[in-house]
Image (cartoon, rainbow, N blue to C red):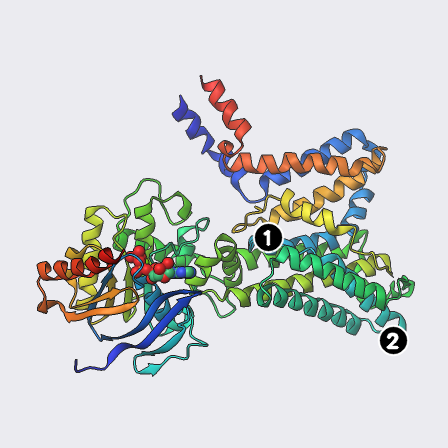
Amino acid sequence: MTAPPIVRLENVTKSYGKVESLRGVTLDIGANEIVGLIGDNGAGKSTLIKILTGVERPTSGSITIKGEKINAGSYSVREAQKLRIETVYQESSLGEKQPLWRNFFVGRPITNRFGFINVKAQREAAEHIMRTTIGFRGVGIDVNTPVSSLSGGERQGVAIGRAMYFESDLIVLDEPTVALAIKEVQKVLDFIRSIKAGGRTCIYIEHNIHHVHEVCDRLIVLDRGKVALDVPTSDMTYAELTEFLMSLHAPARNTA
Amino acid sequence: MAGTRQAARSGWLARFLALEGVPIAIVFAVLIGLFVITAPGAFTGYRIYMSFMATVPPPMIVALGLTLVVVAGEIDLSFPAVIAFASYVFCLLFKEYDLTFVAFGAAILVGVVMGLINGLVITKLGMPSLIATLAMLFVWGGFVTVVSGGISLAIPTVRGTAIHTIFAGRIGVFPVQFLWALGTAVVVWFLLNRHRFGESLLFIGDSLKVARVVGIATDREKIKLFTLMGGLSAFAGVLLSLETSTYFSQAGMGYLLIVVASVFIGGTSIFGGSGKVIGTVFGALIVAVIEAGLVASGIQGFWTRFYIGVVFIVAVTMNTAIEDPDKVPLLRDLRAFTRN
Ligand SMILES: Nc1ncnc2c1ncn2[C@@H]1O[C@H](COP(=O)(O)OP(=O)(O)OP(=O)(O)O)[C@@H](O)[C@H]1O
Ligand SMILES: [Mg+2]
């Protein structure tokens, strides 16, 4: 890697009480890389993402973003957004009772200098996102629809559309294609390719190894809170990767 | 058949009923109508209206603050003590030092600090607001009773001062404080529906977890919320002192139930994530008009609470039914029954 990495994690650990979700993770995410993060259920992928995006604080270890060392005490989702990191979380990050025009912009609404929201501008932008990026053709859905009346896939679409809109430098996608129909999955994959083409960076968490292998430059496998593999995708065929992942499972199965 | 009925429902009538505050305004109008019939003497004259416009502002202002609190999925039960404390500070500074606007400022400041402490206890000790503010009701209530020595203060000379004219004077026969209450309602409406602070409250009430994930500083916003609630409660306390030109340590306690009732009669959901400011304005008016109206109708005062309760049930059911009739199980079953 020639350019300095956009993200560097060193020895990051995270414990929830007695559960050690991350046990010393060290990794770099290079600029304009598409990195696939894979591993078993409970391997610690989402935890890693939450630490990176300021939702959770690491128990120990250091985070460097764009060359700047992050102060764990003051790091927050807002800080991450200011560093132009955008995330689609695995769990819902939408306000159920709130209309779409609020959900697209929550956390960073379009306001005047007194903090009053420009509802008209937000409605128009939301309308635009829905027509162009997500391609909602759903009957009866408009910018005033509350999230509670959307289908699972539509919700996912809203979260992804929101991530697309803010054109951040690093986009983190935690299982974005869950609940999506095949056409929409293709759109997400196209989006990931457009991130690459636009010179931006992406961390892509996905259980469908086929998709990961197809779009990612590099693969990182997490296994019970540790990095088990970190290789360029070109070093491994799809079959080899599958075999590696299965071999990871095997000892665990034997000891159980 | 069902299709045309659906179309009719989504017509102008449904849209009119769905406007914020319309259903509850209708309840209010119906009540006034009933009282005009049962107590024509009082309710066709202007005096009774002027009298309740003079007395309703303090509970209305507190109810507006409480609406924001409920939107965020929280509750504040400490406001009666804040009202009493602010009222005490104002009356004491006026009586002892002849202070007016400074006394006003000091009273508001006391409320703000008490609200801030509430916010800190809730966020930093991680206590549910119901428990924390109930405890604070005892703490502040006990404290003000001790500090004031349990006695009342009368400040009759406050009438005629500039501060009295501004906050509790009369324009002709019209009580000025009602304008302050309406002004507060407008500010609170914009705060909730058009300001980023209100949006934070909506998302916090919707789901605290989601609010955190989208980058809302949930603790800071909650502290701001309880501080604002403290300030509004104190404002109500001062208005009460100005109108009645007294302080007594139980001032405010009488508002506890009617303020909470006003918020929910107005249609704000107890589950958080949404709130109806205009509803709260009418909620407070409804409670006040029932009190005034029953007395004028010659019904014993004891019945007041009974009728507030009945109207409470009717108003909340009506609000739900207008939003979606199927959310009221009885109506849903009736509709299903008539369709068969
Ligand atoms: N808030 C929490 N409290 C306690 N334990 C947690 C919490 N969040 C995660 N964990 C634990 O940390 C471990 C890693 O969880 P994580 O969500 O990071 O897994 P994951 O790799 O994203 O799995 P999946 O593929 O199923 O999404 C799990 O054992 C989980 O039980
Ligand atoms: Mg996960």
Q: Compared with residue A248, is residue B37 higher up or lower down, i.e. above or below? A: above
Rendered residue at 66%/45% (across/down): B282
Q: Mark 1 lies on which chain?
A: B
Rendered residue at 91%/65% (across/down): B157
- The x and y percentages for residue B145 are 84, 63
Q: Are marks 1 and 2 on the same chain?
A: yes
Q: Compared with residue B212, is residue B43 higher up or lower down, i.e. above or below? A: above
The Cα atoms of the two marked residues, 1 and 2, are separated by 38 Å
Identity of the amino acid at label 2? Answer: Tyr
Considering every residue shown, the one lying at the far front of the view is A255
| Res. B266 image quadrant | top right
- The x and y percentages for residue B316 are 61, 38
Q: Name the residue nearer the viewer: B183 or B241.
A: B241
Tally the numbered discs: 2
- The x and y percentages for residue B126 are 58, 63
Q: Mark 2 points at which residue?
A: B97
Q: Name the residue nearer the viewer: B18 or B218.
A: B218
